[in-house]
């Protein structure tokens, strides 16, 4: 079977707050506390605002995000669990209808955020460990270290709501967060983060990577399909996370991950640099053609816009951009140069004119904009050559819009926070610390 994640894009009309927590019993060692002020690759850019102001805005947004979306599992009595509330829905004793509450994608984001904000948040490890326990309580049968893609609240317990299937992007971020946790807190405590990371990385490679093509598959269900099925060879563009794959290769000493890195860039370049479309945009979903990879058709998995730059692909400028900031690999440079040139021309250097969805030729599909589309362009803008005319001003205008936007919904707010962590110079990797 397959699963399709439908994003909630309407504003949240109510707020979830965390209950009172017990004081920390003993100070925990934080090896890389926020802020870190990482030096990115030579020649890349950062917002020119004062560092103290960038840190302050990032911390403030984290506080808002945590208050709105980090929720304690009320049914877990033995060990505390926390989940990232992604749906905007809560169980009602009146209607008594089971409602979805969390997806693995959000859990992965939450675990990443907790590692990066540790030090500022003195309880970050507690929340991270609670998120880890929630992940462990909701894993799949096919790949026991993969997370079931969605859970729901039925009024008495948290139950699986995704048919036991996984979504690869959530697993990738959970694994990466565990590698970071090993560097942040060490693995000698109650949770061996390094071992937990290698366990899920091995399952990702076994159940979510095409064993012959070295492409990231959609979930653990896709590898069970007939090899001629288009969803067997298909992939989600936003699952192309070369920085994660490099870290997985290092952590497991498994060279296959380096092949996944190379294949990811091959696919991206086929869709951008080698394409007649000169926008740098990629589609939400990608399929294998007779010779090369190409945009999926509409209705491939989630809907009529699967062939367009939508709510999945909007994360690509962030995923590829942050890898460039760390490595400055030439494999992504041409794509990012094209993408930056296109969006600047399209908007006239006005971030407010970025729209929530484009055809691959660059035609806006919506009249509004969401932060999940704007914030990733902030990360991409930092990859411009510093000598490019107007480059710094474009970075600064994006930072201003992103850092001052108000709360909206889980997806927009979470993508914004992660991109602010990166743009403020506080993104570090397991292998550069």
Image (tube, rainbow, N blue to C red):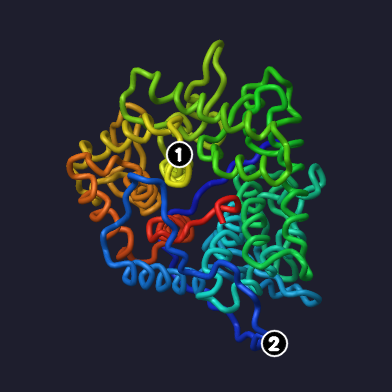
Name the spot of residue 76 as percent of width and height, x first: 76, 73
| Quarter of image, res 30 | bottom right
Q: Of callouts 1 and 2, which one flags the residue occurring earlier in the amino acid sequence?
A: 2
Dot 2 alpha-carbon crowd within 10 angstroms: few under 14, some 14 to 19, many 20 or more: few
Q: Is residue 51 left or right of residue 89?
A: left
Quick one: SS at disc 1?
Answer: helix
Name the spot of residue 263 as percent of width and height, x first: 57, 26
Quick one: SS at disc 2?
Answer: loop
Q: Nearer the viewer, residue 380 or 220?
A: 380
Q: Please tell me whether residue 99 is drawn above or below residue 277 in the rendered image.
A: below
- Going by the picture, which residue comes out furthest to the top? 290
Q: Quadrant of the N terminus?
A: top right
Cα–Cα span, label 1 and label 2: 43 Å
Name the spot of residue 21 as percent of width and height, x first: 63, 85
What residue sits right under mark 1 in the picture?
313
Q: Is residue 221 visible?
A: no
What residue sits right under mark 2 in the picture?
25
| Quarter of image, res 28 | bottom right
| Quarter of image, res 236 | top right
Q: Is residue 301 left or right of residue 97?
A: left
User: Residue at horizontal 34%, vertical 66%?
Assistant: 54
User: Residue at horizontal 51%, vertical 29%?
Assistant: 265
Q: Is residue 383 left or right of residue 145?
A: left
User: Residue at horizontal 62%, vertical 51%?
Assistant: 176
Q: Nearer the viewer, residue 305 or 192?
A: 192
């Amino acid at each position: 079977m397959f699963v399709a994640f439908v994003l909630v894009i309407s504003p949240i009309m109510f707020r979830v707050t965390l209950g009172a927590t017990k004081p920390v019993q003993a100070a925990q060692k934080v090896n890389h506390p926020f802020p870190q002020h990482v030096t990115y690759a030579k020649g890349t850019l950062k917002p020119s605002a004062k560092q103290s102001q960038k840190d302050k805005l990032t911390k403030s947004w984290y506080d808002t995000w945590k208050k709105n979306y980090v929720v304690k599992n009320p049914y877990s009595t033995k060990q505390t669990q926390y989940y990232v509330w992604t749906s905007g829905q809560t169980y009602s004793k009146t209607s008594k209808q089971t409602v979805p509450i969390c997806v693995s994608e959000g859990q992965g984001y939450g675990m990443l955020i907790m590692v990066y904000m540790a030090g500022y948040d003195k309880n970050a490890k507690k929340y991270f460990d609670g998120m880890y326990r929630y992940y462990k309580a909701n894993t799949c049968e096919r790949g026991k270290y993969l997370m079931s893609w969605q859970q729901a609240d039925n009024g008495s317990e948290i139950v699986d709501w995704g048919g036991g299937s996984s979504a690869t992007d959530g697993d990738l971020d959970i694994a990466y967060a565990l590698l970071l946790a090993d560097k942040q807190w060490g693995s000698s405590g109650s949770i061996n983060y390094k071992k937990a990371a290698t366990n899920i990385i091995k399952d990702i490679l076994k159940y979510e990577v095409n064993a012959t093509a070295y492409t990231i598959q959609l979930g653990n269900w896709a590898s069970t399909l007939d090899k001629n099925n288009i969803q067997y060879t298909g992939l989600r563009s936003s699952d192309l996370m070369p920085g994660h794959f490099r870290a997985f290769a290092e952590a497991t000493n498994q060279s296959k991950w380096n092949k996944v890195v190379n294949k990811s860039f091959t696919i991206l370049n086929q869709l951008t640099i080698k394409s007649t479309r000169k926008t740098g945009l990629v589609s939400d979903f990608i399929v294998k053609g007779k010779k090369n990879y190409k945009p999926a058709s509409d209705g491939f998995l989630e809907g009529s816009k699967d062939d367009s730059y939508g709510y999945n692909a909007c994360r690509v400028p962030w995923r590829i951009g942050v890898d460039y900031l760390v490595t400055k690999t030439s494999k992504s440079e041409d794509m990012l140069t094209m993408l930056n040139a296109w969006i600047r021309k399209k908007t006239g250097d006005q971030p407010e004119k970025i729209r929530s969805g484009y055809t691959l030729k660059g035609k806006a599909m919506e009249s509004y904009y969401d932060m999940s589309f704007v914030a990733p362009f902030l990360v991409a803008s930092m990859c411009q050559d510093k000598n490019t005319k107007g480059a710094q001003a474009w970075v600064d205008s994006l930072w201003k819009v992103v850092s001052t936007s108000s709360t909206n919904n889980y997806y927009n707010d979470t993508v914004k926070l992660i991109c602010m962590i990166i743009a403020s110079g506080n993104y570090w990797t397991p292998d550069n610390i």
